[in-house]
């Protein structure tokens, strides 16, 4: 038996023995386990599952073991993912620290920064949020104005960040700040880590059309940040940000509908809310055709993601494919929401009333909330700009 | 790993790309068209010499046994250069009919000839203006000794003008619910009447009338209760191969258009610098990438005849139709006035694509079929 086969065998046995039964089903949004100083668990099983995985470093399987990570190479990490998928194990912990900041710190961070932050990410002690966009810097992210002045032993931060997800519940924020206002705009940006408990920080949740308020605006007023919290070099923050954005876009395009929407599938909704004619066809021919198109598009997207994965394994990745995935998948997620809303009719339009089922309310919330998917992490228009430039080599507009 | 090409497949693809670009660029198709011809026998001789007529034929029938994915890759390249050849009608679809059929005699007789590039086959399937084999009414009357007598009319048979043999889809006794009969008919057989038809793509089509055409037992490729599955698989393969050619047409007209966007200047700058055009080009690029994945998956399904072939085929054909509509229309619009001239190749791709769209199922036909296969 090869070493990899042996690892698979051990992993399978360990997961069978250690993953609680209730953690082997598709989770809903509220079942996600987030880290943090005031960590709360949706259930005892979620806590047990998290603790067992944490102790093996498998909350972050590919992070180096010297920082508490799993220390797995790519091949073993893939085996772990496959075995977890086989048992339908939920992610034990979800956080921007794991999916975005951690990989960026490992690439760009100093030894001291890695030693300070990576183990706490692995152990779920810190919840991270992202301070990128500003009221005047959305698609044009490089025009950030939030200022960090060099005061000798610290930076003094003044300004504001917006669309920061879960800022009220987060412990630390990673920010793009302007350190050189006179340089060309991409050359004057730095990447700063800030403890949310630092005096001078205040947070205002933003109410969305869905009624949710997970997006916040964060205000900084004379916030003192130790100089050791600057990642990479001063005025080189754009390099870090670009590396990190790739992780973000990948994460958004991989969001499964199970997490961002309800668990109701279009087919189930069609069964329950629309019904079939005597030939077994969905009653509305127009909706039937629209659902068919959507299902074809989703299947094409899944096949393309799989093709990209296989091309990567074969050592010949097509660098153009990651550029298209966010655009095509988030656009199609929204098509699903619209179709679901049409299928449910009035029952898909409920707001907050005992008259509607949980699934129905989720559908209407999902329709509204998911409008942000084609905006956050780079709007569709920005994605198309990038494709035109990098995949098609079209001239600068 | 069906979605990634093997080294052998890549070599075949490269060889096809080089040969076709050199031996049969679009100018060659234009020459044929000017001369009023729909095929170039010398070109097919060369393609057969390269083994392309034999790609989908087993070794024991003197074929290369390379599989349908390999052939699909050649068809894509042929689509890029508008090659007028029996590649789809004979090497892919005709050969598949013989491979899937129950007549060993027909295989032994025809496959070596096809492999050598000496025999052409056309699949006579449609009877109406739209493809839908459900409405097959050509009558196959049992002759009492395992053969049939054929009566009926087939229309717009692709490759029908030059074919030496037809694979004809009929129904036992012509009854609406009768079993399918798939029959091999000699083009020169008594009772076969052929009328050539010109479509916008200047290729080879014919309408065929069959009047008491005798089909011997050995020429019956499928009948009885097993014919339904054989015919469905054959048509799925035909739809997938047609999707490959559509993809080739779309890909080349897209690449020609992107090049034009960087060359054409208006308002003192390349028109490809305008965001309105960039976004549409980028969107088309995304659709082409998605289509390519679906086509590779469908080719694998066709090669291995795996469960789910029907769904993969309808997906591939519907998406190929849709994407090629988008890309060829955008190609003309982005070229502007010159896009609607005969001088430019873009119009030739559009004309070919619209015919291919109707072959083996238009978009709504495959939407309906996909929905039915998915259970709604």
Image (spheres, coloured by chain):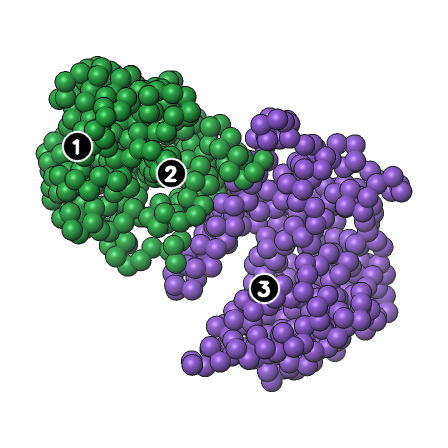
Chain colours: A purple, B green
Residue B310: x, y in percent? 43, 40
In the picture as drawn, the residue positioned furthest to the bottom comes out as A66
Query: Pointer 3: what residue?
Result: A85
| Mark 1, residue position | B120
To which quarter of the image does residue B94 belong? top left
- Label disc, if present, on residue B11 of the rendered structure: none
Instruction: Name the residue beneath numbered marker 2.
Output: B229
> Is A311 on the left or on the right of A328, as rendered?
left
- Separation (CA) of disc 2 from disc 1: 25 Å
Separation of residues labelled 2 and 3 (CA atoms): 35 Å
Q: Is residue A72 left or right of residue A135?
A: left
Asked if marks 2 and 1 touch (Cβ < 8 Å), the reply is no
Both labels 2 and 1 in a single chain: yes
Query: Numbered disc 2: what chain?
Result: B
Question: Vertically, is B97 above or below B206?
Answer: below
For residue B355, say whether it is visible: no
For the question of whether residue A24 can be seen, the reply is yes
Query: Which quadrant of the figure contains the N terminus of chain A?
Result: bottom left
Q: Residue B112: which quarter of the image?
A: top left
Element class at badge 1? loop
The local crowd at label 1, few if under 14, some if 14 to 19, many if 20 or more residues have their Cα within 10 Å, is many
Chain letter for the residue marked with disc 3 in the picture: A
Q: Nearer the viewer, residue A313 or A132?
A: A313
Labels 2 & 3 near each other (Cβ < 8 A) = no
Q: What element does badge 2 sit on? A: helix
* Of the two numbered discs 2 and 3 in the rendering, the one whose residue sits closer to the viewer: 2
Rendered location of residue A186, percent (x, y): 59, 57
Point out residue B45 in the picture as x, y percentages from the top left corner. Answer: 11, 38
Foreground residue, A249 or B263? Answer: A249
């Amino acid at each position: 038996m090869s070493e990899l086969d042996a690892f698979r065998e051990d992993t399978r046995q360990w997961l069978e023995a250690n993953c609680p039964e209730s953690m082997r089903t598709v989770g809903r949004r509220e079942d996600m386990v987030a880290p943090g100083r005031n960590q709360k668990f949706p259930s005892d099983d979620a806590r047990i599952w998290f603790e067992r995985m944490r102790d093996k470093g498998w909350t972050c399987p590919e992070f180096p073991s010297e920082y508490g990570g799993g220390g797995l190479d790519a091949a073993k990490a893939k085996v772990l993912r496959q075995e977890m998928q086989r048992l339908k194990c939920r992610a034990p912990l979800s956080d921007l620290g794991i999916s975005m900041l951690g990989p960026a710190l490992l690439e760009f961070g100093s030894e001291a920064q890695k030693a300070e932050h990576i183990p706490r990410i692995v152990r779920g002690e810190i919840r991270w949020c992202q301070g990128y966009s500003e009221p005047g810097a959305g698609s044009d992210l490089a025009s950030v104005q939030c200022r960090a002045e060099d005061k000798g032993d610290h930076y003094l931060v003044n300004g504001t960040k917006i669309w920061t997800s879960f800022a009220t519940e987060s412990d630390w924020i990673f920010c793009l700040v302007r350190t050189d206002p006179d340089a060309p705009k991409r050359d004057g940006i730095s990447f700063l880590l800030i403890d949310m408990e630092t005096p001078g920080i205040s947070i205002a949740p933003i109410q969305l059309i869905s009624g949710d308020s997970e997006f916040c605006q964060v205000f900084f007023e004379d916030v003192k940040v130790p100089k050791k919290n600057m990642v990479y070099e001063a005025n080189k923050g754009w390099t870090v940000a670009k590396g990190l954005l790739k992780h973000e876009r990948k994460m958004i395009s991989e969001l499964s509908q199970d997490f961002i929407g309800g668990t109701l599938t279009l087919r189930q909704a069609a069964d329950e809310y629309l019904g079939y004619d005597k030939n077994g066809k969905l009653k509305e021919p127009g909706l039937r055709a629209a659902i068919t198109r959507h299902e074809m598009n989703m299947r094409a997207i899944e096949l393309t993601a799989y093709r990209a994965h296989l091309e990567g394994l074969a050592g010949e990745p097509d660098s153009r494919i990651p550029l298209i995935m966010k655009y095509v998948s988030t656009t199609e997620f929204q098509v699903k929401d619209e179709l679901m809303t049409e299928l449910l009719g009035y029952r898909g339009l409920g707001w907050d009333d005992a008259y509607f089922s949980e699934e129905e309310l989720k559908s209407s919330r999902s329709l509204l909330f998911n409008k942000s998917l084609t905006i956050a992490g780079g709007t569709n228009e920005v994605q198309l700009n990038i494709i035109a430039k990098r995949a098609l080599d079209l001239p600068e507009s | 790993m069906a979605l990634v090409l093997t080294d052998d497949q890549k070599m075949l693809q490269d060889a096809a790309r080089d040969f076709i670009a050199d031996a049969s660029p679009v100018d060659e198709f234009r020459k044929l068209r000017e001369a009023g011809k729909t095929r170039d026998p010398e070109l097919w001789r060369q393609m057969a010499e390269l083994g392309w007529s034999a790609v989908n034929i087993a070794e024991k029938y003197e074929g290369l046994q390379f599989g349908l994915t390999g052939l699909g890759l050649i068809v894509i390249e042929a689509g890029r250069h508008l090659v007028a050849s029996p590649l789809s009608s004979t090497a892919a679809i005709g050969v598949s009919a013989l491979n899937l059929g129950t007549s060993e005699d027909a295989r032994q007789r025809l496959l070596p000839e096809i492999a050598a590039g000496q025999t052409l086959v056309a699949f006579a399937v449609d009877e109406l203006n739209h493809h839908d084999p459900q409405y097959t009414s050509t009558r196959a009357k049992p002759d009492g000794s395992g053969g049939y007598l054929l009566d009926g009319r087939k229309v717009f048979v692709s490759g029908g003008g030059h074919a030496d043999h037809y694979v004809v889809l009929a129904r036992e006794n012509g009854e609406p619910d009768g079993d399918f009969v798939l029959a091999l008919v000699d083009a020169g057989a008594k009772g076969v009447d052929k009328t050539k038809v010109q479509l916008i793509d200047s290729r080879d089509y014919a309408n065929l009338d069959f009047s008491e055409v005798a089909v011997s037992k050995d020429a019956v490729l499928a009948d009885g209760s097993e014919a339904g599955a054989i015919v469905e698989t054959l048509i799925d393969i035909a739809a997938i191969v047609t999707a490959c050619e559509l993809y080739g047409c779309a890909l080349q007209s897209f690449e020609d258009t992107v090049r034009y966007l960087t060359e054409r200047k208006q308002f003192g700058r390349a028109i490809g610098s305008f965001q309105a055009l960039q976004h549409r080009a980028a969107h088309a690029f995304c659709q082409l990438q998605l289509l390519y994945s679906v086509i590779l998956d469908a080719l694998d399904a066709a090669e291995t005849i795996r469960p789910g072939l029907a769904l993969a085929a309808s997906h591939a054909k519907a998406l190929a139709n849709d994407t090629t509509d988008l890309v060829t229309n955008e190609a003309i619009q982005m070229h502007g006035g010159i896009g609607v001239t005969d001088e430019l190749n873009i119009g030739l791709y559009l004309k070919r694509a619209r015919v291919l769209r109707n072959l083996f199922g238009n978009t709504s036909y495959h939407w309906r079929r996909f929905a039915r296969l998915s259970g709604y």
